[in-house]
Image: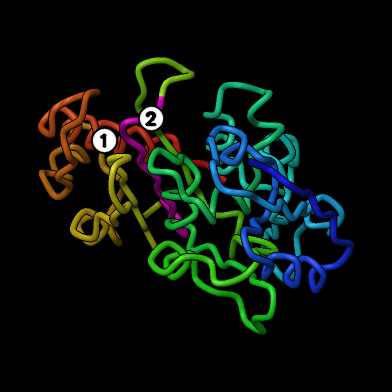
């Protein structure tokens, strides 16, 4: 039950308000609006903090925490793969609500952005922290403070994301993301992350090592090299064997389709 909505004008005011009993940050409201709360809630709106900018700075793409998925899609400064990942949320209504900060803070199990951000080695800026924090640390320990922005180092690298779901509006059951410093004439700096949309996304280190420094092979060979390194959990969408097979297919497709 929402009892009060506060609209701070500065980050410092937002942090002070968040310290109140029962207070939570309100970004796009996607998750808060979808849940019932019996206990009193004070919502601390972030709408007036100016955290929705997207720009290039120091060779990085910096995306404000309040930037919505639709803003990400519409901004040419954002890497194409990240725009594609945001576009996998088929509902434009949801894309206009969901924010980068909310996605990172809550990291929903079927997120298409989180595996790609992991592969990109994204960095998160938190209020009160002098240095950015690695995304993996946020995922393992949670955001200790207000997320201000997410930065993508070297945004021009070839990258791609692929996902599996029953329909465009269904929850995803499998997500694969790949990025490299170069794919031609030889694979360099490759990182591949897979998620079974139930646990923590994992890097496919053996496949990365098998492809590093080599000419990118055809899809069938990539699938063979991928082997059974990833063992996704079975769920209502498919068995572990099926999802493992589809992981190999999606990895091959992502590597063949990766672009800047």
SS assignment at label 2: loop
Which residue is located at x 61 percent, y 70 percent?
145
Q: Residue furthest top?
A: 167
Q: Quadrant of residue 86?
A: top right
Residue 132, placed above or below residue 28: below
User: Does the residue at mark 2 contact the one at mark 1 (Cβ under 8 Å)?
Assistant: no
Where's residue 213, x and y in %? 30, 61
Which residue is located at x 87 percent, y 54 percent?
48
Question: What residue would you read off at disc 1?
Answer: 218
SS assignment at label 1: loop
Q: CA distance from mark 2 to mark 1?
A: 26 Å
Q: Is residue 25 or residue 218 the one in the foreground?
A: 25
Quadrant in which the N terminus appears? top right
Q: Quadrant of residue 34?
A: top right
Q: How is the image coloured?
A: rainbow
Decide whether residue 182 is among the magenta residues.
yes
Q: Is residue 53 or residue 185 the one in the foreground?
A: 53
Where's residue 85, x and y in %? 53, 37
Q: Quadrant of residue 210?
A: bottom left
Q: Residues within 10 Å of mark 1 (few under 14, many from 20)?
A: few
Q: Which residues are magenta?
A: 171-183
Residue 42, placed above or below residue 73: below
Where's residue 227, x and y in %? 11, 44
| Nearest to N terminus: mark 2 or mark 1 | 2
Disc number placed over residue 172 in the picture, else none: 2
Which residue is located at x 34 percent, y 32 percent?
253
């Amino acid at each position: 039950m929402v009892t009060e909505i506060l609209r701070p004008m500065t980050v410092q005011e937002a942090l002070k308000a968040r310290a109140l009993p029962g207070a939570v940050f309100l970004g796009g409201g996607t998750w808060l609006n979808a849940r019932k709360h019996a206990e009193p809630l004070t919502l601390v709106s972030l709408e007036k903090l100016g955290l929705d900018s997207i720009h290039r700075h120091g060779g990085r793409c910096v995306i404000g925490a309040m930037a919505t998925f639709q803003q990400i899609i519409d901004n040419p400064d954002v890497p194409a793969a990240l725009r594609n990942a945001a576009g996998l949320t088929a509902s434009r209504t949801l894309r206009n609500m969901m924010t980068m900060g909310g996605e990172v803070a809550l990291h929903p199990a079927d997120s298409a952005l989180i595996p790609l951000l992991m592969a990109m080695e994204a960095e998160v800026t938190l209020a009160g922290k002098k240095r950015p924090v690695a995304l993996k640390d946020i995922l393992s320990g949670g955001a200790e403070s207000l997320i201000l922005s997410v930065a993508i180092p070297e945004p021009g690298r070839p990258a791609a994301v692929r996902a599996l779901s029953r329909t465009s509006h269904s929850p995803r059951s499998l997500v694969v993301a790949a990025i490299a410093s170069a794919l031609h004439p030889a694979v360099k700096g490759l990182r591949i992350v897979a998620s079974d949309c139930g646990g923590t996304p994992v890097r496919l280190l053996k496949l990365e090592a098998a492809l590093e420094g080599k000419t990118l092979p055809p899809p069938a060979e990539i699938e063979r090299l991928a082997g059974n390194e990833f063992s996704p959990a079975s769920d209502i969408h498919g068995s572990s064997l099926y999802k493992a097979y589809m992981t190999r297919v999606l990895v091959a497709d992502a590597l063949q389709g990766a672009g800047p």
